[in-house]
Amino acid sequence: MSSDQLRFPDGFLWGAATAAYQIEGAPEAGGKGPSIWDTFSHTPGKTFHGDTGDVACDSYNRYPEDIEMLKRLGVGAYRFSLSWPRIQADGRGEPNSKGLDYYNRVIDALLEADIEPAVTLYHWDLPQALQDKGGWASRDIAEAFAEYAAVAGEAFGDRVHRWITLNEPWVCANVGYRVGRHAPGLKDAAQAVAANHHLLLAHGRAVQALRSTAAGTQIGITLNLAVVRPVSKEAEDVAAEFEARQNGVYLGPLFTGGYPDRLTSEYSPAKVPGLVQDEDMTTIAAPLDFLGVNFYFPNYVDLARPDGELRRAGPGIVMVQPEGLPITAMNWLVEPSSIRELLTRVVAPVTGELPIYITENGSSWYDYVTQDGRVEDYERVSYLQGHLTAVHEAIAQGVNLRGYFAWSLLDNFEWAEGYAKRFGLVYVDFATQQRILKLSGEFFAEVTSANALPAE
Ligand code: FCB
């Protein structure tokens, strides 16, 4: 190792991540029930090109190939999610043994390969039967989620030692219930704010369920937190409002004692009469073993340049694309210093000594296969290099970051964007299901084996 390499702390956990609906396919295998994403993706006009997760990466059948790719990446952990309706077809009651068997096979094959399973209980594929009863907008969901967590803890807790209750509750509540771009496709502010609270309550109940069924394991939650940069003094208040809606509304109840005061009843469950009941805030604040953070891009607010608007993030909040920064195929800004700011300014002051994991980070580009069968995704290599350098700086500044999971192991079903947007370190030819390790995968394998970033 040359001295100009950036070394990561001993024991730093390298991983890659996926989610059930994005990779598994096999929507009816073994008696699986429909999820809200089955319904939504089959509704005309909801996804790019009408794409669905019916086949996706066929990982229900091809998980051994996925694990071969994980071995080539040299990762110590694989973050994947359980499909709730594969385990409980309608979301309640006796578990489906065929669904449990599938995940038993995956977990055993990972352990055989010396790769730690890091399991997300909920990555957006709610059983449709529960949506029919109100979904996350209904308080009963917390009880159902706790039962499901107990089923998973009992079945897998002997071998799964790292659990993530929810993936990105902000996206579930806001993209699913407020703007309707994701399943269940609702545009209803009252349901969105209710969903926000019930997601957190369900998280707290799931922590209790896992503590008793999978005692001694590591339990956390994954949030997608925002870095919002005002370009002028006047934009500061708008930036703070945006961060309160996306960060404070989760970090507050989990770590600092409640929902942010500045939010109105459109965004704060605490200001909706009857929504927050006695004991809820105590349940939600149950101590965790780690916080998972997903991060992709920074946001800028420039009130003087509404013409530069890239996308609207909510009423009264105008986001702009600063000149000179690259953007990915998703139209997401690339600015690596933002992940350092996230860890040092947004996360560490709230979490203190608690271990932090980046549970997703990555980028989408228009990848293609060359005539000699390679995928030379230099943009993704550069994104990774920049973000890992910034992550390393955050650790040097004292952030207790314990691991980094790349999004994603595979190109997969990118929700409303269908198969048009590729995030994988491994290319998937969706016509043949052939997998090709990209140049970025080779780069990541170098990083994981050296536990260091190669000198540029
Ligand atoms: C995150 C999701 C993940 C993937 C990436 C690109 O918000 O958790 O499933 O879609 O974005």
Image (tube, rainbow, N blue to C red):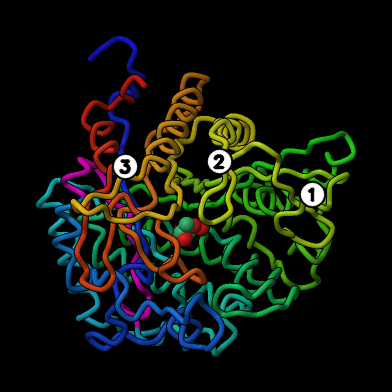
Give percent across and percent down for residue 235. 85, 41
What label does residue 440 carry, if any? 3
Tell me the kind of residue under disc 1.
Glu
Q: Residue at the location (22% across, 69% down)?
A: 433
Tell me the kind of residue under disc 2.
Val
Magenta segment boundaries in residue numbering: 70-88
Tell me the kind of residue under disc 3.
Ser
Q: In whole angstroms, how far apart are the C-alphas of marks 3 and 2?
A: 16 Å
- Find out whether residue 80 is within the magenta segment: yes
**In front: label 3 or label 1:** 3
Reading the image, the residue beneath label 1 is 241
Foreground of the two, 323 or 443: 323
Side of 25 where 176 appears, left or right: right
Quadrant of image for the N terminus:
top left
Q: In whole angstroms, how far apart are the C-alphas of marks 1 and 2?
A: 23 Å
Q: Classify mark 2: helix, strand or loop.
A: loop
Dots 3, 1 in contact, CB < 8 A: no
Classed neighbour count for the residue bearing mark 3: other residues with Cα under 10 Å, few (<14), some (14–19), many (≥20)? many
Dots 3, 2 in contact, CB < 8 A: no
From the Cβ of disc 3, is ligand 1 less than 8 Å away?
A: no
What label does residue 220 carry, if any? none
Q: In the rendered view, would you say 9 is above or below 273? A: above
Q: In whole angstroms, how far apart are the C-alphas of marks 3 and 1?
A: 36 Å
Reading the image, the residue beneath label 2 is 334
Residue at the extreme top: 3
Q: Classify mark 1: helix, strand or loop.
A: helix
Give percent across and percent down for residue 188. 72, 78
Q: Classify mark 3: helix, strand or loop.
A: helix
Quadrant of the image occupied by residue 414: bottom left
